[in-house]
Structure formats: C-alpha cells, structure tokens
C-alpha cells in the first residue's frame, strides 16, 4: 500500500465554498493539437468545485483510501518542522502544485527514502530537483496541457490590462473618483504594437493565436521553429534568440520553462536592449527574470509595465520588492488554477496515480523524468545540469 503526500494551498480565508458563481463548466475533451483531456477510470469530484485547496483534496481521498492507501494532505510546507517534512521520509508519492510548491530539493529527495513518484498537479516541475530525481530514479510527471489555455488567457488579460492601464482606472472607481485624465495618461491601444513571445510551446502558441485578431505584429523565439504554415497563418517573425527578438517588441511575454538556459535571462543587460517603455508579461517562472533588475527597470521607466503571477519563493513574503514596484499588475500564482483548470489537473493527477498504482505506463506526454532519465515532455522541454 502506498503513502501519498499531497501539498495544496490553503482554503479561502472565509472557508471552503458552499456555492459557486456558475453551475457547470464547458465540456472540453481535447486540447489544441488533438491530445485528449485526462481520462481517469473514475472521478469523485464535481468539476467546477474548488479542488486545489486543502479541503478540495484534488478529489482523491475516496479513490485512494478505498484501495487501502494512506493519503495525507497539508498546506504546511516550509521549514524543517513542517508537516510536509515530517511526513516525507516514508512517502511513496508526493503531489504538489506549482502555485504552492512543495520544493523537492536534493536534500529532501535524499530524506524521502521511499519516494518513487512526484506528481505536479498542473504544469512546470522546476520545484523538483530534476537532477536528484534522475539520480534517485524518482519518476516525475505533470498534467501536460491541463492549464495551458488558462495561462494563455491570463497572459492576454494581463497584456491588455498593462497596455491600457486598466488597474489604476479600476482603483479610481473603487475610490469614488471620476478622474479621466489620471486614468488615460498611461493608456494605449495594443493595435499595431509588436508583441513577442519567448517560447511558442503550448502556452506561447495559444497566446499568439489569441492575439492575432488584435492586429498586432507577432514575433517569437524558440529552440525549435514552428511549422511554416503556422508561421504564415499567424504572420509570425521568427528570431534566433531572445536577445535578437526583444529590441523589436513593445510587449514581450515569457512562456518558456525555467531551466539552466532560461534562469536569470531577463537581467539588466537584456532589459537595456528592450524598447524604452516596453511591457513584460511573465507567467512562466519568476527566476527567468532578475528580481531586482525588473524593479529597477520599472522605477527608471525602461519598462512601462510588468505583470505576471509567478514569484520566487512562493508564497512571496510581504516585503518582496515586486509588491511595491510601480506599474505592475502582479497576482499571486493563479493563472493556471482557475476552477476550469483544476478540474482537468485533478483528473490528470488521478489518471497518473491510477496508472502508477496499477503498474501500467503513465502517458508519455505526462512524463518529465522516468527510469533515471528525462522522458516524454521532460526530454523535449527540460534540461538537467
Ligand atoms: P511547453 O513545453 O509546451 O513549451 C515550452 C516551450 O519553451 C517549448 O517550445 C520549448 O522549446 C521552449 N523553450 C525551452 N527553452 C527555451 C529557451 N531557452 N528559449 C526559447 N524557448 C525555449 O510548455 P507550456 O507552454 O505548457 O508551459 C511553459 C511554461 O509555463 C512551463 O514550463 C511553466 O513553467 C509555465 N507555466 C505556468 C503556469 C502558471 O500557472 N503560471 C501554468 C503552466 C505552465 P522546444 O519545444 O523547442 O524545446
């Protein structure tokens, strides 16, 4: 019997919801490109309910406990005396979400003597030390595509809200004002702007597709070039590198994984090559940007706006400089955890567990590390040191 240790974010401050804004979710059975949405053998939750918080339990308790497994759920993940650390030594499986990551460092992997499987309920497994997972033969899997469109929608929302300066205008309304000049003195149209994405994978390409009708000039850079018909359909300009692309762009969106090649990519030097007054949207990973360089660029005006939902560490402390820098549109890490996304990644987590517990293969597209190597999606998108 397995012990499954699951780290989830806290319930809402006013308690676990007893009702929801909408009755149901649209039915989606496949993603762009044809991959099917998760296909677990059963589901013990209502799609559209809050599953990603502690009381939601990713809808897994009945499934696991009825088969005799032990299921521990906690939000307490920081420090040596956290519940996560106390429960880790004999856990066979760890489940964590990028929004509230249980950092599986090399030290923790060494302490987790039974650990065989680390599941990311969502996408982005950089909170797991992949080198240590490779060395210890821990399988790492994530629910590929489960929230890619959720993030793409968030990126477009943030881009428009930054360029049009939506958030300060909304604040004027909350404050009882009607200050049109204050509201519009930094407000532009995105039409005609040059918008570039660092990476055109699932999210990056979905962002490009959503932006096309806004009549913008679209740019991208990626390690692999998109098929020529896609470039033609969307009118894309390809650049060999991020450094080549950013000087051309009014708006840059980062949609690449965090790995040694991308860590610290947006530093003072790169930002100095961007257009004065460019906007940067980062929903990928915070460490792709140099934290202090971003704050400096907003203060100097080199960047006109920065928005995203990814921080380091997570949760970010109350004195994190990004909370107080000017012209930002940061949210906590939420873009990939809409109720719609939760239904998919909870089902995908169950699908992965069903396969692993039955000893049958986990879908190739869910794999990041398997049998001591980068595998599946991991082999394509990640690198180890
Ligand atoms: P994909 O794997 O579909 O796409 C990632 C793309 O990045 C691939 O095309 C890959 O290239 C490319 N890439 C990798 N390294 C570089 C580089 N150095 N320069 C340019 N391109 C690079 O991932 P997704 O689109 O699904 O997700 C992207 C990232 O977004 C995730 O890794 C995760 O960190 C983040 N994310 C954030 C979420 C949130 O809630 N905020 C939720 C989900 C994901 P190639 O394929 O050619 O190797």
Image (cartoon, grey):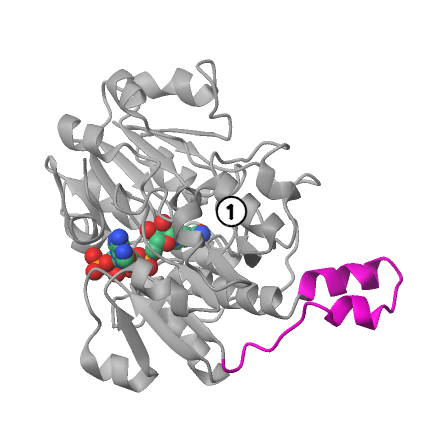
| Number of residue marks | 1
Pick out the residue farthest to the top. 81
* Quarter of the rendered image showing ligand 1: bottom left
Residue beneath the point at 59% across and 38% down: 321
- 51, above or below 31, in the image: above
In front of the other: 340 or 323: 323
Residue 179 within the segment the image draws in magenta = yes
Residue 378 within the segment the image draws in magenta = no
Residue beneath the point at 40% across and 19% down: 85
Q: What stretch of residues is rendered in magenta?
A: 166-192
Residue beneath the point at 41% across and 16% down: 86
Is 228 displayed left or right of 202 in the figure? left
Residue 63 visible in the displayed image? yes
In front of the other: 354 or 307: 307
Q: Is mark 1 within 8 Å of ligand 1?
A: no
Q: Quadrant of the C terminus?
A: top left
Q: Quadrant of the N terminus?
A: top left
* Rendered location of residue 294, percent (x, y): 51, 47
* Rendered location of residue 19, percent (x, y): 66, 55
In front of the other: 329 or 39: 329
Q: Which residue is mark 1?
A: 294
* Rendered location of residue 188, percent (x, y): 63, 74
Residue 311 visible in the displayed image? no
Snapshot quadrant of residue 226: bottom left
Snapshot quadrant of residue 170: bottom right
- 32, above or below 201, in the image: below
Q: Secondary structure at mark 1?
A: helix
Is 199 displayed left or right of 342 in the figure? left
């Amino acid at each position: 019997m397995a012990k499954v240790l699951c780290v989830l974010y806290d319930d809402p401050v006013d308690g676990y919801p007893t009702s929801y804004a909408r009755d149901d979710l649209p039915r989606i059975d496949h993603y762009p490109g044809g991959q099917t949405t998760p296909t677990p053998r059963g589901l013990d939750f209502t799609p559209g309910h809050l599953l990603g918080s502690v009381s939601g339990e990713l809808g897994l308790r009945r499934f696991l406990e009825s088969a005799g497994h032990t299921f521990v759920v906690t939000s307490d993940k920081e420090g040596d005396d956290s519940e996560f650390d106390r429960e880790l030594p004999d856990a066979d499986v760890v489940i964590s979400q990028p929004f509230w990551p249980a950092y599986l460092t090399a030290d923790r992997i060494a302490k987790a003597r039974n650990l065989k499987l680390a599941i990311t309920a969502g996408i982005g497994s950089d909170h797991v030390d992949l080198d240590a997972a490779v060395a210890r033969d821990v399988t790492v899997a994530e629910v590929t595509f489960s929230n890619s469109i959720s993030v793409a929608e968030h990126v477009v929302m943030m881009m428009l809200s930054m360029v049009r300066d939506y958030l300060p205008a909304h604040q004027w309304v909350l404050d009882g004002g009607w200050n049109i000049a204050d509201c519009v003195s930094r407000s532009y149209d995105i039409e005609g702007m040059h918008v570039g994405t660092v990476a055109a994978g699932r999210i990056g390409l979905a962002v490009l597709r959503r932006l096309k009708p806004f009549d913008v000039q679209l740019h991208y850079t990626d390690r692999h070039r998109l098929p020529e018909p896609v470039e033609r359909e969307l009118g894309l300009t390809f650049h060999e590198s991020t450094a080549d692309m950013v000087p051309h762009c009014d708006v840059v969106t980062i949609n690449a994984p965090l790995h040694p090649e991308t860590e610290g990519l947006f530093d003072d030097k790169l930002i100095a090559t961007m257009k004065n007054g460019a906007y940067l949207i980062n929903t990928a990973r915070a460490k792709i940007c140099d934290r202090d360089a971003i704050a400096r660029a907003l203060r100097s005006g080199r960047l006109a706006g920065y928005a995203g939902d990814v921080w380091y560490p997570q949760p970010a402390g109350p004195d994190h400089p990004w909370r107080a820098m000017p012209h930002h549109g940061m949210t906590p890490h939420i873009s990939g955890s809409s109720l719609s996304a939760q239904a998919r990644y909870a089902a995908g987590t169950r699908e992965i567990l069903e396969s692993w517990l039955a000893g049958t293969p986990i879908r190739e597209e869910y794999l990041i590390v398997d049998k001591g190597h980068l595998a599946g999606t991991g082999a394509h998108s990640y690198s180890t040191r």
